[in-house]
Image (cartoon, rainbow, N blue to C red):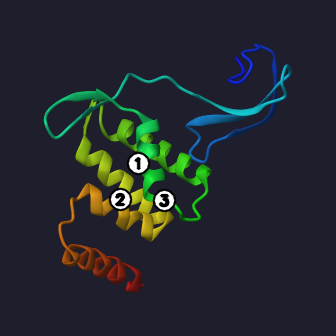
Amino acid sequence: MKCPRCGANDDRVVDSRESAEGAAVRRRRECLGCFLRFTTYERIETSPLRVVKKNGERVGFDVERVLAGMARACEKLDVPTEALETAAHRVEARCQEEYDREVPSAVVGNFVMAELERIDHVAYVRFASVYREFRDVSQFLEELERMSEVERRP
């Protein structure tokens, strides 16, 4: 594996473990040239999944874009990066399980919201407010009320 800092091709695997859902192997590596530690993921290559946007445009599914959106929603919150990475990969896996070649962007957004709701409620509301295009405070209050009702259920 090529080192992202010095470009050397000589490294060693420090730690290797399967992801929570078993869809990938996470490896911590150390460059033997500059001693930088970095993480790589090994996963089964599947047929490329395309996202159908609202305007009909089709783009390749990009787990890094999903992760970036989730990270934006979690700014200044105490949410571990690893939790977001795992959630983003769960979104990707769910899209691949439920859709063969193309997945509507609305579905991706709903999957992201479900993951964020499990991780952090503030991040969920932030993401939902942008994704669902909240226009006034009443929409925030409706969402908060829905979340309160869900928490009150036994």
Question: Where is residue 69 shown, x and y percent of the image?
Answer: 41, 48
Residue at the far left in the pictured view? 55
At horizontal 23% and vertical 47% (from top left) the residue drawn is 106
Q: Position of residue 12 (x, y in %)?
A: 83, 24
Identify the mark nearer the N-term, 1 or 2. 1
The answer to whether mark 1 and mark 2 are in CB contact below 8 A is yes
Question: Which of the 4 quarters of the picture holds residue 38?
Answer: top right
For marks 2 and 3, give the CA distance. 9 Å
The mark nearer the N terminus, 1 or 3, is 1
Give the residue type at disc 2. Phe
Crowd band around label 2 with a 10 angstrom C-alpha radius: few (<14), some (14–19), many (20+): many
Q: Dots 2 and 3: beta carbons under 8 Å?
A: no
Question: Which residue carries the number 2 mark?
Answer: 127
Q: Secondary structure at mark 2?
A: helix
Q: Amino acid at mark 1?
A: Gly
- Which residue, given by chain and number where applicable, does mark 3 sit on? 74
Indicate the quadrant containing the N terminus: top left, top right, bottom left or bottom right: top right
Q: Position of residue 70 (x, y in %)?
A: 44, 52
The image quarter in which residue 132 lies: bottom left
**Residue sitting at 28 percent across and 58 percent down?**
130
Q: Nearer the viewer, residue 32 or 117?
A: 32
Residue at image point 21% right, 59% down: 133
